[in-house]
Structures are given as structure tokens and as C-alpha cells.
Amino acid sequence: MSTLPPARTYNQNHIPRKYTPGKRRISIYWTWSYPWESQRDPAAMENRFSTITEVRNALWPAYETPEYSAAQFLQGIAGTLELFHRSTLSFQQLAGEATGHPVAVFQRIDQAGYKLPIDERILADTDTLMVFGLDHLISEQEAAPNEIAAIREWLKREGTCLLLAPHHDVGFTPDMQQRQIEYQHHGDPLVPRQQRFGQYTRSLMRALEVPVMNKYGLRPAVVKGTKEIAPLTAFRDLDALALLKNVTTFNFHPHLPHYELTAKDANAVRVLANQPVDLDRPHPFITAGNREFTTLLWMPAQAPRAGHILLVDSTNFTTLFGGTDSLANFWRNLALMK
């Protein structure tokens, strides 16, 4: 039996997956315009991804291996976008094995310039749609009325789940001093002092009446004397979906969004988990008296919506910042969710 990894395909039409009772068909939707993001001016100080050269320099020698050399890997911003794609392969493998269906991966505008809005081409063979909100606000990605209508109709189908994952909003203030405080708090030299994500997911949340706003980029606390992320504060009595079964931690990422509730209707949105924040690094969020930020929320079905809505950051499905058995348990719980 061959030990080689499967052959990879690219730039071809999606092959629909047949419905199998009890076996979820999962799809990832990257909200970015790959050409817009990858062709940003590397001299721009704000609101862009790092080039792979900047990544290699900051994380040296982690990427000083042949597969990341110029002969084999894109060296500009496009290379960093490909790191995101590669970082979800472990999740895709686990979810595929758990469900018996390959995870489909779509982009709003892909490398070849094809634009794919969320419509029946994606939704027809999808039970769980994961919307990864990594589009910069200034790229002006917005959910169109026909997309919103298609998602609303899809959510009327029993067994559906919409996972919204707007990423961080760092440095949204014009106050330069606060931007510097935020930068020093997360401590990642690859994130500029202003990096605002998630216009597409924000437009979906408004349209679907999801009372949540992604805010800040917060560094999780660690277990004292270690580099291990501090355990979640989990509200397991509210976790009817068993998403947190055998889950104690998510992924360490130095700038995670706080999912701020903009309405207090406990029946509409249930907070399933908070993450302790690093109190040793000053931040306006901490100054305001907060000790934890919200990291996992659930909106149960509410007629006419038969499907669930979840909110959790996309970095919890990547391996760029490591991974743990606890995180793999979360992936499996999501894939096998009833």
C-alpha cells in the first residue's frame, strides 16, 4: 500500500457530494479576494497580510526548509495566503475521516480570478458552512442580497449549521497611542498596528440579525510557568450540541477576536466559552475591567430558521500556531454534530 499523500488537484469544478444520513458535508468559504489581498503593496504599513519573506524573518528558522524556498513556494503575500490554506489540511483530514465526505474549500475570488458568491452551487451539498472572515475591511467584500436570501433559505433546512468566523479588528481607533498599546499587547511583529478584518462576515451578521461584533485582537493567558494556553471557561450546561465534549482548550493565537454581544437576549445567543486574557499585557479591554473574552457562541434554531449558527474564530481550525488533542476533539465534535 502506498504511503504517498494523495495527489492534489487545482482549478477544476466542484464535484457535488451525495447526501448521507447522519454524515455532515462540510464546506469552508474564504471570504477574501485572493488577487486583492495578494497584490497589496508590501510597502503599505497597515491592513495587509505579511509577505512570506517577513514571515520567514520573524519566525526564523521555522520556514528555512526546501519546501518554502523560492524554487518551490510563493515568496510574497500570496505565499502567506497559501500558508492559511495549508494550515487547515489537518482539520480537513480529520473531518473527512469522521464524516466520510471530503471537506470542500471555496474562495470568494480565487487565484484564477473566478468569483464565487455563496449560492446553491455551494449550499446544495453543504450541511455545515464555515465562513472564514479573513477579508480586510478596505477590500469592501459584502454579502449581496441574493447571497443573503440563499443562506436564509438554506438555514430553513433541517440539519444545517452556519459557522461564522470573523477574525480580529486590531487598531480600529484613530488614537495612535492605543494602537501601539494593542500592538504591544498581542506582541506579534507580523500584525500591523491596524489590521481590520471581516467586512463580509459583518454584513452577513447584520442581515441575519446575529447580534455580535468582532472586536480587538487579544492575547490569551497561559498557564503560569508554561507556554500552554489557559483553559477555557466553558458553560457546559448550555452546550446541548456537545461541542465542548472532552475540550478544555482551543488554539493559542496571539490576537484572537472578542465576540462582543450587541444584544442581551439569552434565548437568541448563548455563550458557550470564554477565554482568559493575558492580564500581564495592558490593553483597553483589560482596563475596562474584563478578564476574559468571548470565543464560542451558539444561536439555536429559531423558526423559521431550522439550522444552527455558531461563532468561533477561524484560527481554531488551523495548525499555524500548533494544535492539541483538545482542539482535535473540538474538530471532531463539530464534524459529528447532531
Image: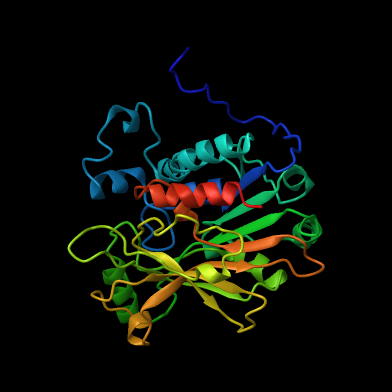
User: In front here: 16 or 60?
Assistant: 16
Above or below residue 98? Residue 209 is below
Left or right of 264? Residue 168 is: left
Residue 162 visible to the viewer? yes
Left or right of 227? Residue 243 is: right
Residue 35 placed where, x, y %?
Answer: 54, 46
Q: Which residue corresponds to the image point at 80% horizontal and 55% vertical from the top-left?
A: 157
Colour mode? rainbow
User: In front here: 289 or 60?
Assistant: 289
Identity of the residue furthest to the bottom in this view = 288
Left or right of 333? Residue 188 is: left
Quarter-of-image position of residue 276? bottom left
Residue 336 placed where, x, y %?
Answer: 60, 47
Quarter-of-image position of residue 150? bottom right
Identity of the residue furthest to the left in this view = 225
Quarter-of-image position of residue 68? top left
Residue 199 placed where, x, y %?
Answer: 58, 65
Q: Which residue corresponds to the image point at 43% horizontal and 51% vertical from the top-left?
A: 327
Q: Which residue corresponds to the image point at 58% horizontal and 29% vertical from the top-left?
A: 10
Residue 39 placed where, x, y %?
Answer: 48, 48
User: In front here: 302 or 29?
Assistant: 302
